Amino acid sequence: MSNFLAVATVSAALQRLLTPRISAAVGGAEVWVDRSDVKRQKSGVNIYMYRTSLDSVWRNEDLPGRTSDGTILRARPQVAVSLHYLLTFHGKDDELVPQRLLGATLAALHTHPILGSDLIDEVTTEATAQPPTHPYLALADLVDADEPVRVSPDPMSLDELSKLWSVFFQSPYQLSATYVASAVRIEESTGTPVEAPPVLQPQLTVRGLLQPTIISALNASDPRAPVASTSVLQITGSGLRGDRTVVRVGPSELTPQTADIHATTVQVALTGATQLRAGFQPVVVAHEWLVGDAPGEPRGGETSNPVGVMVVPQVTLNVTATTMTVTSDLTVGRSQQVTVSLLDRSSGATVRQVDVPPLPADTTTISVPKPAPDADLPAGKYGVALNVDGAQSPTTRNASGTITSPLVTV
């Protein structure tokens, strides 16, 4: 790893590498490290770093440098970047100077694609010489990097090259070539890492891989009945039993009541799901494995595929002369789609749907205007249901199938 001067050191090393070869190709030619739109009166090559990018090889090598709470530094964080250069060639075109300089540059970078330690040492030595060249690089430590920086052509299409030159306002195109130098690995020099304490007592637990899979999640008392907050959910699948098993229903984590010895079914009561909401909820079975001496320390294990279950709200109704207030046993989120339906008592079909305006906050109480009778809604008694994201609250029916509760008289 290198300190923050590594980027500038690479540019200076390219300048140092090309200078003798350029001057040998064209007498008096120089090598600059400047913007490419600066007007030149002499022959030479300009090295301009126009962008950087994260190195695709090293970007995943940086492990977390701190403890989980972020208080102790274990290793200095590092970033690996690639430096993209635009090389432009200046001189008299009628004497083919730019083309001669291009040829000399191509040959030099093809012959010396690695910025070796000798070249980096020359840069740091010149930084402390009298008179110094780039004196601000005296503390650069790129020479100590684990791997040397490699320079390779970075070819561009005509369209990409035209877009690059378009950023130089009112600057005429110059004969140019593009190169990339990688990887330059930089780390912050401040802070002293603290080594992790040694392992005092090794704990090893071996087990077979057990991937839980859910096939279905239904009401345990009646698979055809809707699932409500008072229901017991029966989950069927395979590999559902671990050292510890947790069932996640939406944002709630529940402990199963029972699990058969073959790990093909588990049952969990939804009454403990304090964060349960009405609507379509994902159900996931998660394993925890006990590691070490008994009773063991729980560790996260495999999780199953998610299976959706529609959770219906159970409601009570309060009616005044002008308002219907529906109270749900489950929280209704402000971003959920909510409507109140008036139902035909015999068929259960929706006769009138009352839209609920956007909710300002999560709530359990929904109030809507009480509909007045009209041509499509004759006076009489109607069942009332709350719909939340497609989950409709159940109604109570008598032996003949007629809705008896909750009711509103229009």
Image (spheres, rainbow, N blue to C red):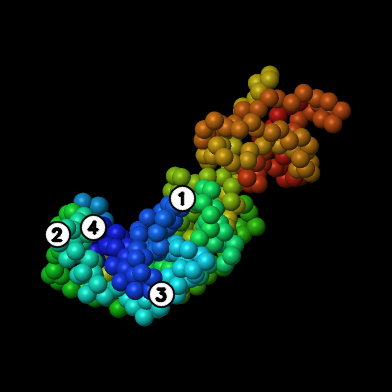
Q: Residue at x 18, y 73 (%)?
A: 202
Q: Which mark is residue 134?
A: 4
Judged left or right of residue 174, residue 369 is right
Residue 260 in sight in this render: no
Q: Residue at x 77, y 23 (%)?
A: 372
Residue in front for this viewpoint, 169 or 350:
169
Mark 3 or mark 1: whose residue is earlier in sequence:
3
Read off the residue under disc 1: 251
Q: Are marks 2 and 4 in contact (CB under 8 Å)?
A: no
Q: Which mark is residue 104?
A: 3
Which SS class for mark 2? loop
Residue 263 place in picture, x, y as percent: 46, 72
Quadrant where the image shows the C terminus: top right
Q: Looking at the image, is 193 positioned above or below residue 228?
A: below
Mark 2 or mark 1: whose residue is earlier in sequence:
2
Task: Tell us which disc is closer to us: 2 or 4.
Answer: 2
What amino acid does circle 1 point to? Answer: Pro
Residue 155 in sight in this render: yes
Read off the residue under disc 2: 130
Q: Are marks 4 and 3 in contact (CB under 8 Å)?
A: no
C-alpha separation, residue under disc 1 versus residue under disc 4: 59 Å
